[in-house]
Amino acid sequence: MPASPSRPQPYRVWWLVFAVILAVLAMLWGWMAQRAPEEYAPAPAAKSPSPSPTPEIPEIARQEVWTSNTVASGAYLTNTITLEPGITAPTVVPYVVNVEDTTELDPDEVAREVQATFDDERGWAGYGKRTFQLVADVDAAELVIYVTSPDTTDELCAPLETGGKWNCRNGKNVVLNSDRWKYMTPTYDDLGTYRAYLVNHEVGHFLGQGHVACPKAGATAPVMMQQSIDLGGCVPNAWPRDAD
């Protein structure tokens, strides 16, 4: 019987390549099977930084000047941080922030927002006469900014009548009703801008400024206008220099 013809050399080469590929795949499969799932799971998508928390504003607070049931404790939390003024001026006013402990507000967060208002060129420091510095020593403060419950606001503002709704300046104290800080009034649509208005308006009283009216319909409201109550035809404005 004649011998079988030998197979061509290319056939043996391709068979060897195929065997090597199978061996490599088998090794990879065994390696992946031994890894923990999280080692080769796709990485989660990067998350954007969360914005600073803001209170949920009830719908009724967009329709009327709303008063909450925040309990008055008369106990305060004072800022622990200090901040240098961002604007230089001949006179520096040291101040502290006191937040009533029932308002659920962080005094350091409030203080940062207040200092940002003071450091804006459109604010009182922008006139170049004085600037404001956050300190942590109440005894060293020439200005004390309170954020307090409606009842405590009324107490600190007396004999001024704030009716559980409004804010005041009384001596070296600027007293901001926590309901206004957290929920603003229907005259404003942006909470951050309204907070800047609160600070600038009441600190304006501390600086000797009195109330003014809307000069004419459609004009930019002066910051010393009682914008929380009524705009009188003016456009809301949080900054002293923007109405000059």
Image: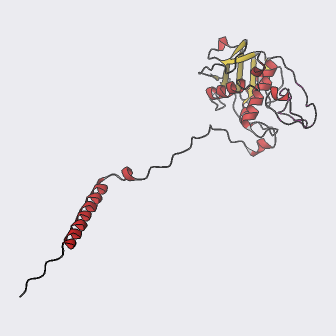
The image quarter containing residue 182 is: top right
> Residue at the spot x=70%, y=13% of the render?
92
Q: Please say whether residue 73 is one of the residues in the magenta stretch.
A: no
Q: Residue at 89% of width from left, 26% of height from top?
A: 212
Was residue 222 drawn as part of the magenta stretch in this picture?
A: yes
Q: Quadrant of the C terminus?
A: top right
Residue 104 appears at what percent x and percent y? 64, 32
Q: Quadrant of the N terminus?
A: bottom left
Quarter of the figure with residue 115: top right
Can residue 140 be seen here? The reply is: yes
Residue placed farthest to the left in the image?
1
* Position of residue 27 in the picture relative to residue 63 (left or right): left
**Magenta region, residue range:** 210-236
State whether residue 152 is above or below residue 43: above
Q: Is residue 236 left or right of residue 87?
A: right
Spot occupied by residue 218 in the image (x, y as percentages of width and height): 90, 38
Residue nearest the viewer, comparing 180 with 12: 12
Magenta stretch prevailing secondary structure: loop
Across and down, in percent, residue 62 comes to 78, 43
Q: Is residue 210 above or below residue 197?
A: above
- Can residue 157 be seen by looking at this rendering? no
> Image point 72% across, 17% down: which residue?
131
- In this view, 43 is above or below 107: below
